[in-house]
Each structure stands twice: as C-alpha cells, then as structure tokens.
Image (cartoon, rainbow, N blue to C red):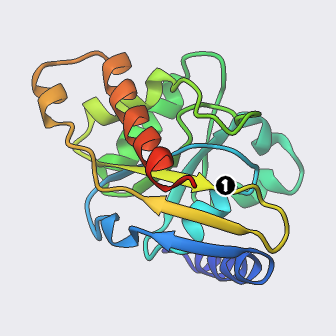
Amino acid sequence: MSKLYSVGQFLCRTYFRIFYRVKLIGVENIPSNGGVLLCSNHIHQLDPPLVGAFLKRQTRFMAKSELFETPILKGLLPKLGAFPIRRGMSDRQALRTGLKLLGEEEMIGVFPEGTRSKTGELGKGLTGVGFFALRSNAHIVPCAVIGNYKLFSKILLVYGKPINMTPLREEKASADEATEKIMEGIQQLLDEYHK
C-alpha cells in the first residue's frame, strides 16, 4: 500500500465516521493475498472511497476516463492506483491493465453497472467484469453499498463471500454468463441486508 493511498484512506475513514454511521459486514471475506476482483453496486459518487476506506489492502479502482481529464484528478488518481476505462466501448488497454494487476495479485475495485443507479436498484452488469473473472484466477468478491448518503444517516457496507467461478472457468462460459453470476451475488447481498 502506497503512503499516499494510506493517508487518503485514513482521511476517508475519518470523513465517513464523522458524517455517516457506517456499519461494516464481512470484511473478513476479503482474501489477505492473491488477486481480488471486488465488485460493488454503484449508487453515489462517494462509493469508491467508501468501499476502499476500511480495508487492509489497497484497492485499485477502475474509473471512467473522463475523471483523468480533470485538472486535479488526472495527477492524483494514478498515484492512488486508479486506472482509466473508456465507457461505452471495448477498452482493450483497460482490460489488459486489469488482467495484469490481477496477475500481480493486486485487488481491483469495479462497479459492473458502469454508472451510478438513479433508482437504487441494481442494473445490468457490463461484460468486462465477467472477462476479468474468467481470464484470471482472482477471488471474486461481491460487495453491496446500502444507504442514501444523507448526512449522519446509516450506510451499510457488506462484503460477501468470494464467488466460486471454477465451474464457469472449466465450462469456458461466456463473459455474459460470468457477469450474470457476479450480479446475482451482489443482488443477494442487497436482498439479504436491505431493510
């Protein structure tokens, strides 16, 4: 974990503890080593810092390429380990970067829907996440963010148990099928913990 990331993580944790009532469930489900693909629903722009703030491992987030064009973020995001993806098209460079990082036993954070949900309901996942799941030996961990980010309200952050992708890898399943299985894992967490 880089020093800058560690400082940023501390600041994010402090922010979330002051302004929200964050409850964590299943942090022990994050493998301590090996490649990890952390797949979360996406309801707010604060999801990335929240999802990574309380973990012992650095999360390398895949972020929309537009963020890397803004004056402050274009220098900061790469230093925090984030890497860009062009939305709405097949971005081979992003796919290569993701596979390389997973092969180097890094943890990547992705939001398979590709954009924030306007309704809070889980949308359809994009096939890139299934591609990563099938082409790597990474642990696939579903994650659910439940809450509305109103100041001082409760936000539930749930990390599920890793999804067993071995059968799909052995069957040479499609990226669509793998994505669907991952989205089902996220939906199960939303169904179980959303009250």
Where does the image place residue 164, in percent across and percent down from the top left? Answer: 20, 42
Q: Residue at x 45, y 69 (%)?
A: 25
Q: Residue at x 63, y 73 (%)?
A: 22
Q: Is residue 25 left or right of residue 99?
A: right
Q: Residue furthest right?
A: 71
Q: Quadrant of the C terminus?
A: bottom right
Circle 1: residue type: Asp
Judge whether 139 appears above or below 179 on screen. Answer: below
Judge whether 174 appears above or below 100 on screen. Answer: above
Q: Residue at x 78, y 60 (%)?
A: 149
Residue 46 in sight in this render? yes
Q: Quadrant of residue 31?
A: bottom left
Q: Is residue 150 left or right of residue 191?
A: right
Where does the image place residue 74, in percent across and percent down from the top left? Answer: 78, 50
Where does the image place residue 132, in percent across and percent down from the top left? Answer: 36, 34
Q: Residue at x 43, y 71 (%)?
A: 57
Q: Nearer the viewer, residue 163 or 57?
A: 163
Judge whether 14 appears above or below 58 on screen. Answer: below
Where does the image place residue 70, in percent across and percent down from the top left? Answer: 87, 46
Q: Is residue 131 left or right of residue 125?
A: left
Judge whether 55 appears above or below 34 on screen. Answer: below
Q: Quadrant of residue 8?
A: bottom right
Query: How many circles with numbers are drawn on the protein?
Result: 1
Q: Secondary structure at mark 1?
A: helix
According to the picture, the residue beneath numbered tag 1 turns out to be: 47
